Image: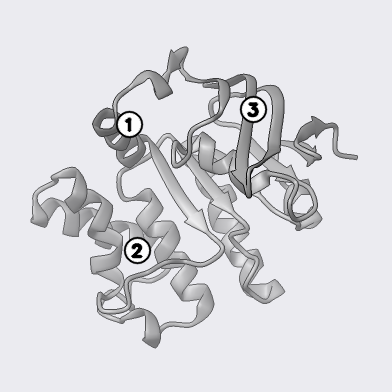
Amino acid sequence: MIQLNNLSKTFIKDGNAIEVLKNLDFTISRGESLAILGVSGAGKSTLIHILGTLDHPTSGTVLFDDIDVFQWDKKKLAEFRNKTVGFVFQFHNLLPEFNSLENTMMPALIHGLPYRKARERAAAILHEVGLGDRLTHKPGELSGGEQQRVAVARALVMEPEIILADEPTGNLDSETGKKIEDILLDLNRTKRITLVVVTHNRTLANRMSKNIGLKDGKIYTYE
């Protein structure tokens, strides 16, 4: 499904080149669950941002179903990202002035779905993640775990082929974090959504079908 070929990313800071990712080669199969592990600063978030087309590689290619998506213009890339990729971040990034239903609907409305269809789809997903009684609650009226479940629902509203999660349980207690893990892994298992998670949590990584590590911008086998 996703193939990285000789992928590198370099940032320029104060006139100095900083190599964050160095000549990465690996493949993510459709329906796989992959954990990316490593210490802070290893390049994990940069990698997941490139996988989600939020950032561009300096060199190399990212192929989705054998298509080099970074050859597309900004508009087509944004359409691809909106339809194909769902994002879940450590900080849920919910809009505080909107309730759970409105936050979940947002990607569908941006895509151009009719309001009624977007609302129906969002409500159904919120019920799936156990928030059927929280549709009209704003983020400030929800617990941290509930807010993250809204973020998961928002990631799912466009029925994406892949979910990219960057430390999705990093700000949660262990019990609440386990519930978020269960939701993500159940989606991977039942809907065959490809799941890629950046995490420091070895327990979560052990529940995934595949692990890789990042160190000094390079991939190694995580033991």
Q: Residue at x 38, y 71 (%)?
A: 131
Spot occupied by residue 31 in the image (x, y as percentages of width and height): 55, 31
Mark 2 or 1, closer to the camera:
1
Residue bearing the label numbered 3: 8
* Residue highlighted by disc 2: 126
Q: Is residue 52 above or below residue 198?
A: above
Amino acid type, callout 1: Leu
Res 57 quadrant in image: top right
Q: Residue at x 66, y 65 (%)?
A: 178
Q: Nearer the viewer, mark 3 or mark 2?
A: 3
User: In terms of image quadrants, where is residue 22?
Assistant: top right
Tell me the kind of residue under disc 3: Ser
Q: Secondary structure at mark 3?
A: strand
User: Which quarter shows the C terminus?
Assistant: top right
Q: Which structural element holds mark 2?
A: helix
The reply to whether residue 33 is in sight is yes
> SS for tag 1?
helix
Task: Give the Cα separation between the discs numbered 2 and 1.
Answer: 27 Å
Quadrant of the rendered image containing residue 21: top right
Residue 63: x and y in percent read: 50, 19
> Of residues 180 and 47, which is closer to you in this image?
47
Residue on which disc 1 sits: 77
